[in-house]
Image (spheres, grey):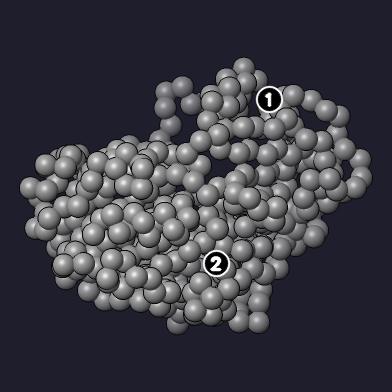
Amino acid sequence: MKLLRTLPTRRLAVLLSAVVAVAMAAGVIAVTAFGGGGATPPPKPLADALHDAVTATRPAGITARITFTNRLFPSGALLGQTGSALMSGASGRLWATNDGRGRLELQSDAGDVQIVWNADKLTVYDASANTVYEATLPTSAKTGNDNGTPPSLDQITTWLAKLGEQAAISAALPDNVAGQPAYGVTISPKHDGGLLGSAELSWDAATGAPLRAAVYAQGSSAPVLELTATDISYGAVSSANVDVSPPTGAKVVDLGGAHTEHGSGNGSQPSVTGVDAVQAAISFPLVAPDTLVGLPRKTVQLLDSGNSKGALIVYGEGLGALVVVERPTAAQGQGNKQLDALPKVSIGGVTGHELATPLATVLTFDRTGVSYLLVGSLPTSAAEAAARELG
């Protein structure tokens, strides 16, 4: 949450787009939507198709020409700040090795974007701002039962059954992607999905390599985010294609390190939770009603950055949850002003700033010495109503 308050609006949008692009490209992405021409694989149960994918021999590497579509930031939402290829979408190239290294290059007239990753680190260079964003990726400590082997068919079947309690999952859809026989699947949340409509993924029936990723908002027939390719080939990838450093002289934004799944290691400082405990720890009146726009309050937690203390309140569950952050206005400093470029909105007599996207709304406003930040996958009308209920 601190990152949301300290990055300039344009860079925040670039970073969010980069995270999405890397998440979609992590397994190597390629080409077109369901229903492409060419030979298709035989029908089979989804569990079998997934098991074949995770047990297939991985290619030595993948090279692809790609197109990244980004409709997350509507025209005017960022006051015309759409120069970055990550914010407006672009075509480019992708390279990935089978040891977890990769590079995604997006090209535009405003300057290229280079996203480079390995098992430990993610680097995003945005030439339009001559800025590098660096982050240490999380590591997962292995459990005693994790020996690196792929899941069995029974394990996949069980996992799909559990997932099916929360989401509607299509069958394995035979397809042909970039001339390769492939399978596709569509997943839609059954409840608590917020503005998310569905997600689609296709993968190579022979190699298991993901072949397409797309995210749709509710009620939309066109994807909000999509990573596709116009050409793909399998084979060894030179280290020179994935081990690329940003240019000397670029501004560096360090996003900090990530913790393992065991936590931050700061076990001597237990979390402060609950309305009464958090109120006793902060210097301003906590506003945490039992419900907000019909969503029940689930958690209240202290945010302690060392020089200021605030509160994080979560309403609702799942993707449809609403997160509220409250801090003293004086503690925000310059970081609070970075959101001033967002479109203005009136919140109970004060001026707030709002970023509205098809998948989520971000809204911030100050009142009586307290700064409020609301983030949730909900319509702007609901976010604004929640902000007014807080004040």
Residue 292 visible, this angle: yes
Residue under label 1: 47
How far from the left and from the top, in percent, is residue 122? 48, 58
Q: Could you say which quadrant of the image residue 22 lies in?
A: bottom right
User: At 69% from the left edge and 32% from the top edge, which residue is drawn?
Assistant: 170
Determine whether 177 is above or below 46 in the image: below
Q: Quadrant of the N terminus?
A: bottom left
In the depicted structure, whether residue 223 falls above or below residue 78: above
193 vs 74: above or below:
above
Image: 350 above or below 17: below
Whole-percent x, y for residue 200 in the image? 67, 44
Q: Residue at x 36, y 56 (%)?
A: 385
Relative image position of residue 137 (x, y in whole percent) = 44, 51
Q: Position of residue 387 (x, y in %)?
A: 31, 58
Q: Secondary structure at mark 2?
A: loop
Cα gap from disc 2 to disc 1, whole angstroms: 36 Å
Q: Earlier in the sequence, mark 2 or mark 1?
A: 1
Amino acid at dot 2: Phe
What residue is rendered at 62% in x and 32% in y?
168
Answer with left or right where residue 22 lies relative to residue 289.
right
Q: Residues within 10 Å of mark 2 (few under 14, many from 20)?
A: many
Q: 135 and 279: which one is in front?
A: 279
- Left or right: residue 273 compared with residue 97: left
The residue under the point 72% across, 61% down is 66
